[in-house]
Image (spheres, grey):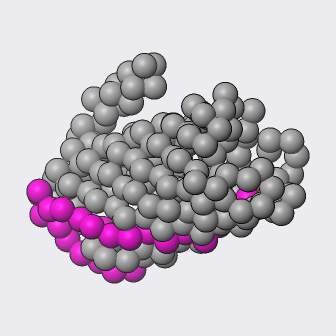
Amino acid sequence: MKLVRVFLLVCIVFVQACALAPFSSNHSARTVGKGNFSVQAGGAVPDIVVPYVRIGYGVTPNTEIGVLSEAQFAQVIAGLYGKYAFINNPEGEAVSLEAGMGAGGTSAYCYIGPSIGYKFHWWEPYLSARYNYVNVGTDLDFDDNFHHIRYFNEGAELQYALVTIGNTLWLGQGFGLNLNANATFGDVETVYAGAGIVFVF
């Protein structure tokens, strides 16, 4: 209940601009495990740094819920996500599906997509794909922040895919470094890198 209140408060505070779906992605195809928390913080770099934070909680061994926030181009988005792992090995393969929704300024977004990964002791590579839908609340101009520049009028509906190739390097018990490369296709087209730190406890 507290997570929902925080999400609503952030959405109310930042109602003067528009934004896109999250640039950040989860650090693993696995879930964090029942009763565990994860905190992931870092930045995505689509020409400028977009700082982010993601906080997850393991509701069941294969189900994770969480909140996320990003500072996108002078506005902030906040959202909720849910993740379910169909294969969830502590070591070895993992397959999961994640969905989320949120808002930033006058825009709203939702997304859904699968992730696959494999954990080799201290190294955990993964691949994820995501369908993003954004309803633009005010005129949106990407300026020079994207390789494919478009202007969208108020009320536009953006649909685009995000593909992430990433890996988490586990440097200690519950502490890791996440590095990823990303590309979007569709109404929004760009490539960018991301990096962050991960704590699972």
Residue 13 located within the stretch drawn in magenta: no
Residue 25 appearing in the image: yes
Q: How many marks can you see?
A: 0
Is 93 situated above or below 151?
A: above
Is 13 situated above or below 137?
A: above
Residue 45 appearing in the image: no
Span colored in magenta: 142-168
Q: Quadrant of the C terminus?
A: top right
The residue shown at (20%, 71%) is 151
Most extreme residue toward the front, as rendered? 86
Most extreme residue toward the bottom, as rendered? 148
The residue shown at (44%, 69%) is 162
Q: Is residue 186 left or right of residue 197?
A: left
Is 79 situated above or below 45?
A: above
The location of residue 105, given as percent across then percent down, is 27, 43
Is 26 situated above or below 69?
A: below
The location of residue 91, given as percent across then percent down, is 80, 56
Instruction: Tell which of 24 and 143 is nearer to you.
Output: 24
The residue shown at (77%, 50%) is 90
Quarter of the figure with residue 34:
top right
The residue shown at (20%, 55%) is 136
Q: Is residue 134 left or right of residue 60?
A: left
Quarter of the figure with residue 29:
bottom right
Instruction: Tell which of 39 and 17 is nearer to you.
Output: 39
The location of residue 14, given as percent across then percent down, is 30, 36
Residue 157 located within the stretch drawn in magenta: yes
The location of residue 15, given as percent across then percent down, is 24, 37
Q: Quadrant of the N terminus?
A: top left
